[in-house]
Image: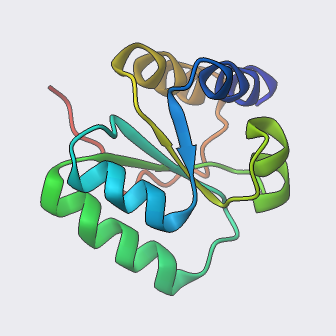
Amino acid sequence: MNKTLNMLGLARRAGKLSGGYDVCVESIKNGSAELILTAADISEKTLKNLLYEAERCKTAVRKLNVSMEELGKACGLKAGIVSINDEGFAKRIVELIETEGSGSGKVDLAYDD
């Protein structure tokens, strides 16, 4: 899990990560979001609304096995949802999630190119 969270910090410093529901939905709609990550403890309503938007635009969503506090600390943001806006970072983060087992075991939406 540490490698995944470290990679999120790198993406943030590179300017390729944005956080918060509204910002992430805007990233999905304008096509800049390559991957959406959520904390394990976001509300069901928020997750449902996010999945609706992501499905419309074919954006992958992964639920991490971390709290909003842990996700926010790793990214330097106070958010339970983050958008990875770079294909390279997105691919590497998905690889780390799969190898570290840092996902919650549930992949909400995943699209392969």
Foreground pick, 74 / 44: 74
**Residue 69 lies in what quarter of the image?**
bottom right
Residue at the (79%, 41%) spot, across then down: 76
Quadrant for the C terminus, please. top left
Residue 109 can be seen in this image = no
Above or below 20: residue 70:
above
Q: Is residue 41 left or right of residue 55?
A: right
Quadrant for the N terminus, please. top right
Residue 69 can be seen in this image = yes
Above or below 48: residue 53:
above
Foreground pick, 57 / 91: 57
Above or below 55: residue 90:
above
Q: In the image, residue 99 lies at what x, y percent? A: 59, 20
Residue at the (49%, 78%) spot, across then down: 46
Q: In the image, residue 91 lies at what x, y percent? A: 41, 19
Foreground pick, 105 / 34: 34
Q: In the image, residue 90 lies at what x, y percent? A: 43, 25
